[in-house]
Amino acid sequence: MNKAVCLVIVIQALRMVQAETPPYIKQCHRNDPKLVDCFIGAIEHLKPYLANGIPDIQLPSVEPFKMDTLALQLTEGPQGYKITLKNMEAFGASNFKVTSLKLSEGSEPFKAKIVMPKLKIEAKYTSSGVLLILPASGGGDFHANFEGVSADLTGKTSIHAFKGANYLHIDALSLVLDVKDVKMSISGAFNNNRILLEATNLFLRENSQVVLEAMQAQLQKKLASEFGKLANQLLKNVPVEQFYVD
């Protein structure tokens, strides 16, 4: 390889690394004694961009935050009451606060805790089985309001070189969700049969925490998967070097 070609490659690599930092990235000094606090500020700096999406890097808005399907078995037996939630949309995910962050060291994972004051979920649902001695098969709209939401995240990352720059990738992410208060209801179901609607909403009012526990394992996996996809969509478009300023 001749010197001219080498020079072109070096110049292109430097241009990529030194490219103008996008407005959604808040840079931190590598030697900042409060580097973790700076990273927390950089994550929270992203909030308005996450709310609106970033078309330049094909990052969708998290308002609403979309998920596909949850299937719940709420009562036991051959006529047990089952609910399937589809086309789920969560509102309020961009209004988060990072309360703690531990950076990964060596093979150790990173850990973070985020809190959200409110999270509203809207979905289409279908149900089957017997509820409170009443046949309750049907479909309609599902509504849930979560308050005092916190999520503990644990993840592993790796760095990959590409065209002269380094890119961070989240290889694995898990999430543990805690919700202080939850209210659930349905509407537009059973051809608006008042008795079935009231019976179902009574069950949901009195058993919201039970329903939450039934959906929690699936919900945590789906949230972790979607959070990981969003984070990697951002990270694959921003070299690690652009997160720092010397």
Image (tube, rainbow, N blue to C red):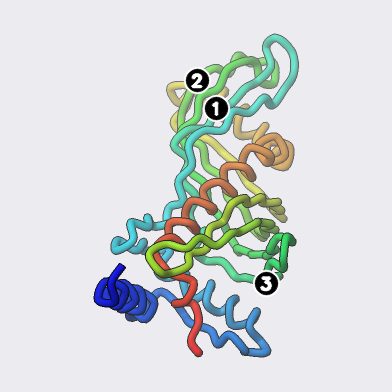
Q: Residue at x 60, y 14 (%)?
A: 135
Q: Secondary structure at mark 3?
A: strand
Location of residue 59 in the rendering, given as x and y in whole percent from the top left corner: 37, 57
Q: CA distance from mark 2 to mark 3?
A: 42 Å
Residue indicated by mark 1 = 84
The label on residue 99 is 3
Q: Earlier in the sequence, mark 1 or mark 3?
A: 1
Q: Is residue 116 left or right of residue 14?
A: right
The amino acid beneath tag 3 is Thr
Marked residue nearer the N-terminal end (2 or 3): 3
Residue at position x 63%, y 37% in the image: 218
Disc 2 target residue: 138
* Residue 181 against residue 188 in the figure, above or below: below
Q: Position of residue 85 (x, y in %)?
A: 52, 32
Judged by depth in the image, the label closer to the viewer, 1 or 2, is: 1
Q: Quadrant of residue 219?
A: top right
Callout 1: 10 Å neighbours few (<14), some, many (20+)?
Answer: some
